[in-house]
Image (spheres, helix red, strand yellow):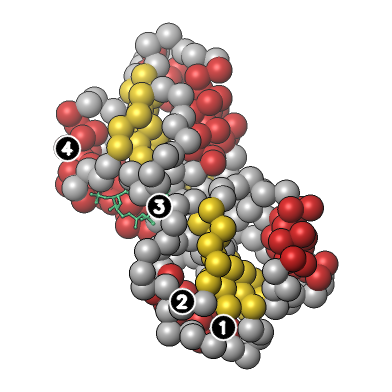
Amino acid sequence: MHVLILGGTTEARRLAELLAAEPLPCLRVTNSLAGRVAAPRTPPGEVRVGGFGGADGLAAWLRGHEVDLLIDATHPFAGTISFNAARAAAATRVPLLALRRPGWLPVEGDVWHETGSLTEAAGLLSALGRRVFLTTGRMGLAAFAPLDDLWFLVRSVDAPEAPHPPCMEVLLDRGPFTLDGERELLRRHRIDVVVTKDSGGAATAPKLTAAREAGVPVVVVRRPPAPGGVSVVAEPRQAVQRVREAYARCAHPDAG
Ligand code: NAP
């Protein structure tokens, strides 16, 4: 049985680790990365890097490599690949499972401003403060480039490229982040406002707690739409269970 995991997330890597920790005989796992990060943390198992060439390319890859189960474990903001996965799965009749962490929900004490896009988020900032902690990643910085009267602390895995805001300090780092670390960061840089995507998950959530404690408002960019009609699990362990169920069906196709 061959499982293709579309990855690039903590959860995708965790899933690959769990599958590698208790290997099933004849279970082949391929992890697919887009190739955006210069030095990615590679998961165990086979790894392929780079786009497939749209939904048709992905469908051809599924057929050519005899994939039995496709798992879309990409980031909730990676909308294109998720729709391509749904189209390719439908075209090839390969079962598709989405591993998608739930979005964050505000709790008492949070001051959140929800927006539909990075551009909308940029439009809110001048009214909220002068020192901005921008955690939306290096892609999409162009939306903030016109804001020349604000100072930005930009945290990203790789160095951002232009266009970007003229007044910015770059912090090269990747999650998981600790609450103590996030508290210290907001304090040291005298942050007035945090900008985040609604990525969900635990690895990057401490910034929300730190902001709540400090009374710092957070601009939260809502998720783009995800394809409907796809079976979704929230946790890597649930995805492992689904792989095992599919494996059992592969091994004993006539049973139940
Ligand atoms: P996207 O807009 O949905 O995808 C753009 C194109 O990149 C896709 O059409 C596909 O190219 C290729 N691609 C994306 N994910 C791929 C994968 N896992 N394996 C092979 N090709 C992939 O995606 P994105 O927002 O640029 O994100 C790229 C990757 O970074 C994703 O794997 C995602 O999990 C990870 N990531 C994204 C974010 C974010 O905020 N967007 C944050 C953290 C991690 P083809 O059409 O040629 O197949």
Q: Which residue is mark 3?
A: 229
Which one is earlier in the sequence, the residue at label 1 or at label 4? 4
- Expressed as whole percent of the image width and height from the top left, the position of residue 232 reads 50, 46
Badge 1 vs badge 2, beta-carbon distance below 8 Å: yes
- Residue at disc 4, secondary structure: helix
The residue lying toward the viewer, choosing from 190 and 116, is 190
Q: Which quarter of the rendering shows the C terminus?
A: top left
Which one is earlier in the sequence, the residue at label 2 or at label 3? 2
Q: Which residue is mark 4?
A: 60
Which one is earlier in the sequence, the residue at label 3 or at label 1? 1
- The amino acid pointed to by label 2 is Pro
The residue lying toward the viewer, choosing from 180 and 239, is 180
Q: Residues within 10 Å of mark 3 (few under 14, many from 20)?
A: few
Q: Which residue is mark 1?
A: 150
4 vs 2, front mark: 2
- Name the residue rendered at 36%, 40% in the picture: 33
4 vs 3, front mark: 4
The residue lying toward the viewer, choosing from 144 and 167, is 167
Residue 36 visible, this orientation: yes
Q: Give the Cα distance between marks 4 and 2.
A: 41 Å
Residue 172, disc: none
Q: Which residue is mark 2?
A: 165
- Name the residue rendered at 48%, 84% in the picture: 147
- Residue at disc 2, secondary structure: loop
Asked if residue 2 lies left or right of residue 40, the reply is left
Q: Residues within 10 Å of mark 2 (few under 14, many from 20)?
A: many
The residue lying toward the viewer, choosing from 254 and 198, is 198
Which one is earlier in the sequence, the residue at label 4 or at label 3? 4
- The amino acid pointed to by label 4 is Ala
Asked where in the image residue 4 lies, by quadrant, the reply is top left
Disc 1 residue lies near ligand 1 with CB under 8 A? no
Asked if residue 175 lies left or right of residue 77, the reply is right
